[in-house]
Amino acid sequence: MLSPMFSCSYIVDEMYLHDAQNNYISPYQGKWVGSYIGDMNGTIILNVSKSGNIEVIRLVNSNIEETYFTSLLGGGSGALNPSLSPISGFKLYGSLETKSGTWKQQNIGGSWTVTKQ
């Protein structure tokens, strides 16, 4: 059986952790716009939320090709979680710290760059 002191301490620690997570604001929050080049060319828009979730919008000839979601990896480096688009298999690698990276889609690829708006 847990002692009441341990139990209360655990609850307080969990409350502080929850508050810290709710109050966290990613330094990369905002709208990032740029281009991807290589075997295909187009525009990418990365909408980064307060918590570090990312809406990826990929445009070709100014038309929305697809929208999918990913996130930043932990650690504060701005590294993108290289999640695969469920529609096309498009995947971004890289970091918002460097504002650049590479992209892959099946057996084609290239590079990308963005700037914060």
Image: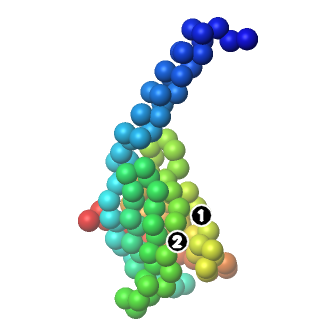
Residue 1: x and y in percent read 73, 11
Quarter containing the C terminus: bottom left
Q: Residue furthest left?
A: 117
The residue drawn where x is 59% and y is 63% is: 83
Residue 48 position within the rendered picture, expressed as x and y whole percent measured from the top left: 39, 59
User: Is there CB contact under 8 Å for labels 2 and 1?
Assistant: yes
- In this rendering, the answer to whether 108 lies above or below 70 is below
Q: Earlier in the sequence, mark 2 or mark 1?
A: 2
**Callout 1, which amino acid?**
Ser
Real-space Cα distance between discs 2 and 1?
Answer: 9 Å
In this figure, which colouring scheme has been used for the structure? Answer: rainbow
Q: Is residue 32 left or right of residue 55?
A: left
Q: Secondary structure at mark 1?
A: loop
Front-most of residues 53 and 99: 53
In the figure, 11 relative to 116: above or below? above
Q: Residue at x 49, y 41 (%)?
A: 75
* Residue 74 to residue 60: above or below: above
The answer to which of 50 and 112 lies nearer the viewer is 50
Q: Quadrant of residue 39?
A: bottom right
Q: Amino acid at mark 2?
A: Tyr
Taking the view exactly as shown, the residue that stands out farthest to the bottom is: 61
Res. 36 visible in picture: no
Q: Can you tell which of label 2 and label 1 is closer to the viewer?
A: 2
Looking at the image, which residue is at 52% across and 71% down? 68
Residue 83, numbered circle: 1
Residue 70: percent from left, percent from top: 53, 62
Q: Which residue is mark 2?
A: 68
Secondary element type, mark 2 = strand
